[in-house]
Amino acid sequence: MDKRVLEANRVVWNRVADRFYGRNPLPEYGPLAPDEEELGLLGEIEGKKVLDLGCGSGHSLKYLEEQGAAELWGIDLSTAQIRAAQQVLSESQVPVRLFESAMEEDPGLPESYFDMIYSIYALGWTTDLDQTIAHAYRTLKPGGTFVFSWEHPMYSRMLKEEGLLKLVKSYHEEGAYEHKSWHEPAVMYQRKISTYINALGGAGFRIERMVEEARLSGMDLEKHTNSWYTAERAALLPTTIIFKCRKDEE
């Protein structure tokens, strides 16, 4: 766990939280990607205790309350994001527990408690993937599901020039990097698909499904296309990768 990077990213997220208020929450999994209403990865929500890793402004938790979730729990590094989530969920009719914490750290979550843990475009911020996934495994009930999405590991390594995709960074290269689409010093982590698979398997998770498809309907293109996520690139390689995993029954 790199506390210097965590603190730097906390500062950045406190500064840009308004810019990401309500952006791409569930049922969306990411820009130009199929959503939950199409994929059905979460299954039955009614009566479930759910935990959001990187809950942001709380809109994904709000969506799950509308689907019948029994308890809403969230973790986020940013003070500003937690305050926004508190406001969004202030009238919730079910228990809400929000923690200002890095997902690598344990803010006091109960063991084997949650029916479902998920993370929408947040897990790639972790400075310690193994530790974060281990926490998810520990706090998930046997038989529970863990679903997360993140930018596809190939997307930032490829740029489109003169109608062709150009590899601009080795796929083998992993570690911290400054994301080019940000105008702030935001540090993310480049990881291979195999790194995610091995971390999940090492923690004890069974991977049930991996999704790499793109969705390029007119509505999606109007809503999501910007200087970083473009229709031209998304037509050639996916913007998003989604994993559905399960903690087996004991």
Image: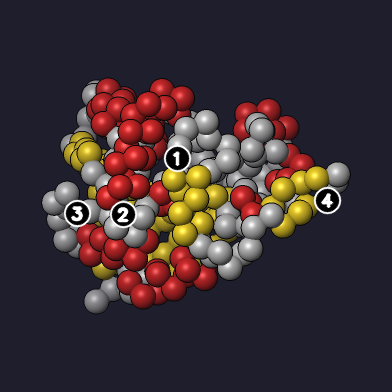
Q: Quadrant of the N terminus?
A: bottom left
Q: Name the residue at 65% across, 31% down.
A: 226
The numbered dot on residue 2 is: 2
Mark positioned earlier in the residue sequence (3 or 1): 3
Q: Which element is circle 4 on?
A: strand
Q: Name the residue at 45% across, 37% down.
A: 185
Which mark is in front, 4 or 1?
A: 1
For the residue pair 41 and 202, the one nearer the viewer reads as 202
**Of the residues shown, which amino acid type is indicated by label 3?**
Asp
The span from disc 4 to disc 1 (Cα, nearest Å) is 28 Å
Which mark is in front, 4 or 3?
A: 4
The span from disc 2 to disc 1 (Cα, nearest Å) is 14 Å
**Of the residues shown, which amino acid type is indicated by label 4?**
Leu
Q: Which element is circle 2 on?
A: loop
Q: Which residue is mark 4?
A: 164
Mark positioned earlier in the residue sequence (4 or 1): 4
Q: Is residue 61 left or right of residue 163?
A: left
Mark positioned earlier in the residue sequence (2 or 1): 2
Q: Residue furthest right?
A: 162
Asked if residue 50 shows in the view, the reply is no
**Of the residues shown, which amino acid type is indicated by label 2?**
Asp
197 up-or-down from 218: above or below: below
Mark positioned earlier in the residue sequence (2 or 4): 2
The numbered dot on residue 113 is: none
Colouring rule applied to residues = secondary structure
Q: Are marks 3 and 1 in contact (CB under 8 Å)?
A: no
Q: Is residue 124 left or right of residue 228?
A: left
Mark positioned earlier in the residue sequence (2 or 3): 2
